[in-house]
């Protein structure tokens, strides 16, 4: 018989994102909560995937430790649901030896890592830290992309054409020829483009263009 969902257990640690432990075994939840709190992580435990989803939002920060086999929605179904709903929290799946195929499926669905039982405390901490580091890297990259696209979005259509030609390595005269405008007009568009982008050199503008994901 499945235990009744227990209230979420929270350990407010200083620094770091929150680690969500999702497991139907209360002893496992408490053990991991104590381990992670002692390691300096803020922890919240959930007795089921459904309990976790009731509080998770796209703004939830940290990572999730998910048992692959749980009553109701299992770990694989949870990972697939999170991916479909755009919940970016990195997931570390906990699995038994007989469930490696499921763990591989979870990773294909977006899970960051999987840990086989029995695992050591060191392996768990290592996986969590790697998941958090990866999430921070992804978030920083997303911010760079968003910033670059916002800045390039300030350019007029013609200024974007000029930037695209310059990124392709064409000098002003060839840009003018390709766009059927005068070299002087190219120079004016180029100066306006640099000012709007807030860059001092063409190389900076090129890096911004690449960061925005517009390179061919």
Image: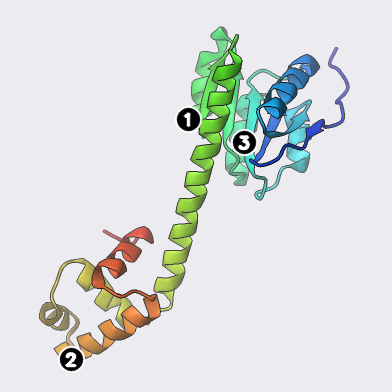
Which image quarter is the N terminus in?
top right
Residue 58 showing in the rendered view = yes
**SS at mark 2 in the image:** helix
Q: Could you give the CA–CA distance between mark 1 and mark 3, rounded to whole angstroms? A: 17 Å
Tell me the CA gap for discs 3 and 2.
54 Å
Q: Residues within 10 Å of mark 2 (few under 14, many from 20)?
A: few
Which label belongs to residue 108? 1
Callouts 3 and 2 close, C-beta under 8 Å: no
> Residue shown at 58%/24% (left/top)?
125
Who's the residue at 26% across and 82% down the image?
190
In percent of width and height, residue 209 lies at: 33, 65
User: Is residue 20 toward the left or the right of residue 158 in the image?
Assistant: right
Residue 23, visible in the rendered structure: no
User: x and y percent of residue 88 in the render?
Assistant: 58, 44
Q: Taking 189 as reference, is 89 above or below it?
A: above
- Choose the circle earlier in sequence order: 1 or 3: 3
Task: Please name the residue that numbered disc 3 is placed on.
Answer: 63
* Disc marking residue 184: 2
Nearest to the eye among marks 1 and 3: give it: 3
Which residue lies at the image location 49% right of the left edge and 39% below the top edge? 134
Image location (x, y in percent) of residue 208: 35, 65
């Amino acid at each position: 018989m499945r235990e009744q969902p227990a209230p979420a257990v929270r350990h407010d640690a200083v620094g770091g994102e929150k680690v969500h432990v999702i497991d139907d075994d209360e002893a496992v939840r408490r053990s991991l909560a104590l381990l992670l709190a002692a390691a300096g992580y803020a922890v919240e435990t959930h007795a089921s995937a459904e309990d976790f989803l009731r509080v998770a939002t796209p703004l939830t920060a940290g990572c999730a430790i998910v048992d692959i086999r749980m009553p109701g929605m299992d770990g694989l179904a949870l990972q697939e649901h999170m991916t479909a709903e755009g919940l970016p929290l990195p997931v570390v799946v906990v699995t038994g030896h007989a469930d490696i195929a499921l763990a591989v499926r979870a990773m294909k669905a977006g899970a960051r890592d999987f840990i086989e039982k029995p695992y050591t405390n060191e392996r768990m901490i290592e996986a969590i830290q790697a998941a958090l580091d990866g999430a921070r890297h992804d978030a920083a990259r997303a911010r760079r992309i968003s910033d670059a696209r916002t800045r390039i979005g300030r350019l007029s259509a013609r200024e974007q054409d000029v930037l695209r030609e310059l990124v392709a390595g064409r000098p002003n005269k060839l840009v003018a020829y390709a766009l059927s405008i005068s070299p002087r007009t190219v120079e004016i568009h180029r100066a306006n483009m640099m000012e709007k982008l807030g860059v001092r050199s063409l190389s900076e503008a090129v890096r911004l263009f690449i960061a925005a994901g517009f390179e061919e």
